[in-house]
Amino acid sequence: MVATLKNLLRNEDGATLVEYGLIVALIAVVAIAAVKLLGQNASSALNNAATNIAPAAGG
């Protein structure tokens, strides 16, 4: 029983998996924030272009 407990305490596979999971979650949060920011900037630029083109097109 004591040997089994010692083996479980020495086994770091679960900890490594948790660390990788945290890294993936952090990358996902950063990617979502970047896409949101870039999306807002692109929307603003396209709206500005549409506003400037509409009078030239007669609309």
Image (cartoon, rainbow, N blue to C red):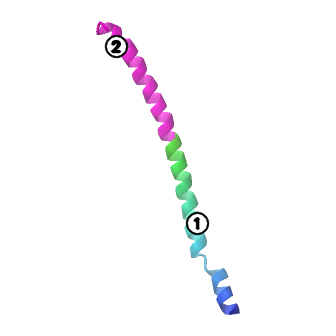
Q: Residues within 10 Å of mark 2 (few under 14, many from 20)?
A: few
Q: Which residue is the extreme one toward the front? A: 59
Q: Is residue 25 left or right of residue 58?
A: right
Which residue was labeled with disc 1?
18
Q: Position of residue 50 (x, y in %)?
A: 37, 17
Q: Is residue 17 magenta?
A: no
Chain part drawn in magenta: 34-59
Residue 28 position (above or below residue 36)? below
User: Circle 1 — which element?
Assistant: helix
The residue located at (47%, 34%) in the rendering is: 38
Q: Is residue 53 magenta?
A: yes
User: Circle 2 — which element?
Assistant: helix
Distance from label 2 to label 1 (Cα)? 52 Å
Residue 16 position (above or below residue 22)? below
- Say which mark, if any, is on residue 54: none
Q: Position of residue 13 (x, y in %)?
A: 57, 75
Give the mark, 2 or 1, whose residue is nearer the N terminus.
1
The residue located at (43%, 27%) in the rendering is: 43
Occupied quadrant, residue 10: bottom right
Q: Position of residue 48 (x, y in %)?
A: 42, 18
Occupied quadrant, residue 16: bottom right
The residue located at (29%, 6%) in the rendering is: 58
The residue located at (68%, 93%) in the rendering is: 1
Q: Amino acid at mark 2?
A: Ile
Q: Is residue 24 left or right of residue 9?
A: left
Which residue was labeled with disc 2?
53
Q: Amino acid at mark 1?
A: Val
**Label 2 close to label 1 by CB (< 8 Å):** no
Residue 18 position (above or below residue 40)? below
